[in-house]
Amino acid sequence: MNERLKTYEEKMQKAYKYLTDDLAAVRAGRANPHVLDRLRVDYYGTPTPIAQVGNVTVPEARLIQIAPWDKSLVKEINKAILASDIGITPSDDGSVIRLVFPELTEERRKQLAKDIRKKGEDAKVALRNIRRDGNEAFKKLKGTDVSEDEISDLEDELQKMTDDFCKRVDKSVEEKNKEIMEI
């Protein structure tokens, strides 16, 4: 692959990774420990991911269990979960925190599907912006030691790369929507 295209491919890869991470955090009616990935707990003055302060398990299809290694963190973890936007109220027995995921209503499923499609569109916009930046950079090469044919080839390759990433985005969005609509 051409070195000039490499940077744009890396940027597109990052945009796609951001989308997949974002989709993994969407709760789909069953317990998914990734909904906790963005939550931070104040651990001796340092914001720390929940997975690094305790054991996160999924003992049942709609239950996440968090067993902090330091029992004094139970209140902090509860506070972080309540302050987040995951919409689940934690329950604890002083040493273990449980998150029970309710069954999604039809209305909530449709809203989540709509949100997921929006995230997919946002990712495609980001990919197209990267393509635009690449095309502008390639156009600036005119008049240098790079021929018009080479510039055209670079633009074509960048377009193919953009199309490929857009297909990946569509596939990821479709899979997540299917997962959400499943009862």
Image: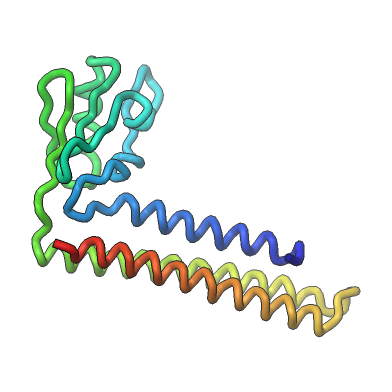
At 23% across and 52% down in the image, what residue appears?
Answer: 27
* Quarter of the figure with residue 23: bottom left
In the image, residue 32 sits, relative to residue 141, either above or below, namely above
Left/right of residue 105 with respect to residue 170 in the rendered view: left
Q: Work out whether residue 59 or residue 48 is closer to the camera in this orientation and state it.
A: 59
In the shown orientation, is residue 156 left or right of residue 128? right
Residue at image position (40%, 69%) is: 171
| Residue sitting at x 25%, y 69% | 114
Above or below, comparing residue 93 to residue 32 in the picture: above
Where residue 15 appears, x then y in whole percent? 50, 59
Vertical comparison of 53 with 143: above or below: above
Q: Height in image: 135 above or below 71?
A: below
On the image, the x and y values in percent for residue 11 come to 59, 59
Quarter of the figure with the C terminus? bottom left
Q: Quadrant of the N terminus?
A: bottom right
Q: Which residue of the protein is positioned furthest toward the right in this rendering?
A: 145
Viewer-proximal residue, 23 or 84?
23
Q: Quadrant of residue 80?
A: top left
Q: Viewed as shown, does residue 6 lie left or right of 47?
A: right
Task: Name the residue nearer the viewer: 163 or 82.
Answer: 163
Q: Colour scheme of this structure image?
A: rainbow
